[in-house]
Amino acid sequence: MQEPKTLVVRLHPLDDVVIACQEVPLGTWLETEAVRVRQVIPAGHKIAVREIKPGEAVRRYNQIIGFATQPVAAGEAVHVHNLGMGDFERDYAFCADAKPTVPISPEATFQGIRRANGQVATRNYIGILSTVNCSATVSKKIAAAFEGAGLRDYPNIDGIVPLTHGTGCGMDDRGEGIQVLRRTLAGYARHANFGGVLVIGLGCEVNQIEALLVSHGLTRGPFLATMTIQESGGTVKAVNRGIELIRQMLPQLNSVHREEISARHLVVGLQCGGSDGYSGVTANPALGSAVDLLVRHGGTAILSETPEIYGAEHLLTRRAVSKEVAEKLVARIKWWEAYTARNNAEMNNNPSPGNKAGGLTTILEKSLGAVAKGGTTNLVDVYEYAQPVTAQGLVFMDTPGHDPVSATGQVAGGANLICFTTGRGSVYGCKPAPSIKLATNSALYSRMTDDMDINCGEVLDGNSSLEEKGRQIFQAMLKTASGQPSRSEEHGFGADEFQPWMLGAVM
C-alpha cells in the first residue's frame, strides 16, 4: 500500500484544523501550516492550526463542526476532549444556490430488465415478505427449499429472498408504527427487482394481510401471492404450500432478458456506515461526483440518514428547487429534534464509538462529510420514510442513521442500487438491491479487499482525483446494474439486513 504523499490535508483556506493523512509523530513540523505538532496524532484525526479559545467555533470545510470546550494550542489534537456541540444559527437561504442541471447527451445506458408495468429492474429475485415476526421461520424454510440446486433449471432468477423482521403485532393498528411498516412492506412488494412476491402472515396479527393490500392498492395475482400459517394448517403445511406457490412463478419469471436501458431508470440509495475522518475527504465527495453524473444522465439519487445531515441541512436547503421543498427538509429536522428529546436523547448521540476512533468528533462534523455524498445538483424533493420516490434528480428521504433501517426505507422507496461508503469497514448488503462498497482509505481497502468494491483512498494517496474516482464509481453503477455482482452479493448479504423502522409503543 502506497503511503499518502502529504502528512496532512487542508479542506478550506479558512479552516481551523487540518486532517492527518497518516499517523503524525510528536514534534513533527508541518511546513505548509507553520505549526509544530504537540502530540502523536492518529491517522484521520484533526490538528489545530491556530490557538483556539474556549467557546470559539471550530471550522472544517469552512463550516462549524463544534465549539472549543477548553483552550487549544496550535499543533494540538482537536477531538472529543476539547470540542463539543453548541447552538448556532444556520443560514437556510432557501433556493439561493439552485441552478439549472446541464444534461449529458447521449445518456449512459446499462443492461436492465424491463417489467410489464414499465418498471426497470437491476436484479430478478422472488421475495418472501413476512407480515409479522411470527411468520419469519416459515418464510425462511420456504426460501431454503430453493437453495443449492433448487433453481438450477431457472438460471435467470437471482434467488429467493426471505425478508423477515421483529414487529407486526403488539402495536396500535392505526398508529404511525404500523403505517410505516405497511408502507415499507408495500414498497418491497412492488419493487422492480422482485419479479414475484409471496406475503406470509400468521393469521391473527395486528398487521393483517388484507389491510396491507387494501391500504396500498396491492392486488393478488400470479406474481403476488398471499397465505397465512393458520389457514394453511400449521408450519409443515404452510411451508409446502409456500414452496408450491413459488414454483408456479418460476417458469415465467425465468423468461426475462436484459436489454439496453437508459441510466435515467437508475435509482441509487446513498449510504455511509462505519465512517471515519476520511469519509468527507475521499469516498463521500467522490460518490457526490458520481451522483452529479447520474443526475445529469437523468437518473435519481436518494440521500438519507436525517440525523447524519444534522447541522449541515442548510447546505441542502440552499440547493432546493423551491421553498416548499426546503421547508419539507427543515420540518424533518425539527421532527428529529423533538423525537430525540422525548426519548431523553440528543442528536449528538451519533457519531458512534467507531466513528470517533476514526477521527470524527461531533455530529456536525460527520454531517458535513455525509452531505457530500449528494453532489452539487439541486434538491428536487423530500420524502418521508419508505414513500415511493417519483421525482428524478437528487432527492432526500427521512430515515434514521442506522444503516439497515435507512437502506430498507430507500429500497422500499424504489432504489434499485445502493452505493455505500465506509471508513472503518462495513460489510452490509441489501437485497433485492445490489450494494456497492466504497472504501475511504487504502489501508481499509487492503485489509478488507474481499468486501470493498472501490478504493477511494487513492484520492488521499495522490493517485486519483475526486472527479476521476467519481467517473469510476458511475461506471461501477452501470456495470453492477447490468448484473455484475458486488462484493456483498458474492458473500450472500442482504436478506437478514432487512430492518423496517420501528416507531411507536410495543404493547
Image (tube, rainbow, N blue to C red):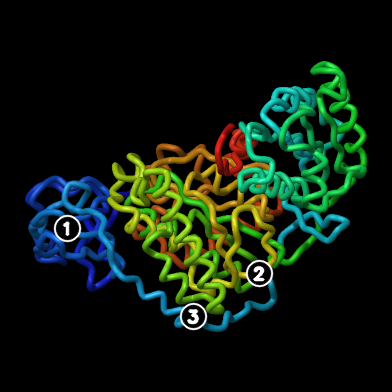
Please say whether residue 297 is visible from this viewpoint: yes
Q: Tell me, for residue 78, which label it has, or none.
A: none
Label 3, secondary structure: give it: loop
Q: Amino acid at mark 3?
A: Cys
Identify residue type, mark 1: Ala
Looking at the image, do the residues carrying marks 2 and 3 touch, with CB atoms under 8 Å apart? no
**Label 3: few (<14), some or many (≥20) within 10 Å?**
many
The residue shown at (22%, 47%) is 80
**19 lies left or right of 319:** left
Q: Looking at the image, which residue is at 63% across and 46% down?
A: 175
Residue 283 location in percent, x, y? 43, 56
Residue type, label 2: Gln
Q: Earlier in the sequence, mark 1 or mark 2?
A: 1
The residue labelled by disc 1 is 68
- Observer-nearest of 217 and 263: 217
User: Circle 2 sits on which residue?
Assistant: 392
Q: Is residue 11 visible?
A: no
Q: Which residue in the protein does label 3 denote? A: 95
Which quadrant is home to the C terminus?
Answer: top right
